[in-house]
Amino acid sequence: MSWRTKSKNKKKACPFTSGRVPVKSIDYKNYRMLRKFVTETGKIVPSRMTGVTNYYQHKISNQIQLARYLALIPYCDNH
């Protein structure tokens, strides 16, 4: 018998497909929205944590990388 209890994790709803966040906001110029999908250390948050579908996760990661290249978002945290 396992000593760990199994918790039932509900799958998070995608904010883009549920209509809470407009899809047009996925843009490299909208760095305030993109910062929600980046950790404090500068890593892109995985979709299992944010609940975003694979399609939108790919779009978000591409836009974050473009914003990093244009120096709108830092690559890493401030030392």
Image: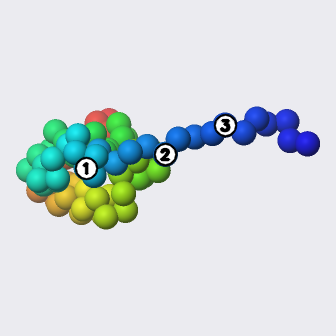
Which label belongs to residue 16? Answer: 1
Secondary structure of the residue carrying numbered label 3: loop
Q: Is residue 13 left or right of residue 35?
A: right
Q: Which is more N-terminal, label 3 or label 1?
A: 3
Camera-side residue of 18 and 63: 18
User: Which residue type does callout 2 highlight?
Assistant: Lys
Quarter assignment of residue 1 = top right
In the image, residue 6 sits, relative to residue 16, either above or below, namely above
Secondary structure of the residue carrying numbered label 2: loop
In the rendering, at what x and y percent does residue 19 appear? 22, 45
User: Which residue type does callout 1 highlight?
Assistant: Phe
Camera-side residue of 72 and 52: 52
Q: Which residue is mark 2?
A: 11
Q: Is residue 5 left or right of residue 57?
A: right
In the rendering, at what x and y percent does residue 42 appear? 33, 45
Quarter assignment of residue 8 = top right
Camera-side residue of 71 and 54: 54
The residue depicted at 17 percent of the width and 53 percent of the height is 23
Report whether residue 76 is seen: no
Q: Residue furthest left?
A: 29
In the rendering, at what x and y percent does residue 48 appear? 47, 50
Quarter assignment of residue 78 = top left
Secondary structure of the residue carrying numbered label 1: loop
Q: Which residue is mark 3?
A: 7
The residue depicted at 72 percent of the width and 39 percent of the height is 6
Q: Residue furthest right?
A: 1
- Separation of residues labelled 2 and 1 (CA atoms): 15 Å
| Quarter of the picture holding the C terminus | top left
- Separation of residues labelled 1 and 3 (CA atoms): 26 Å
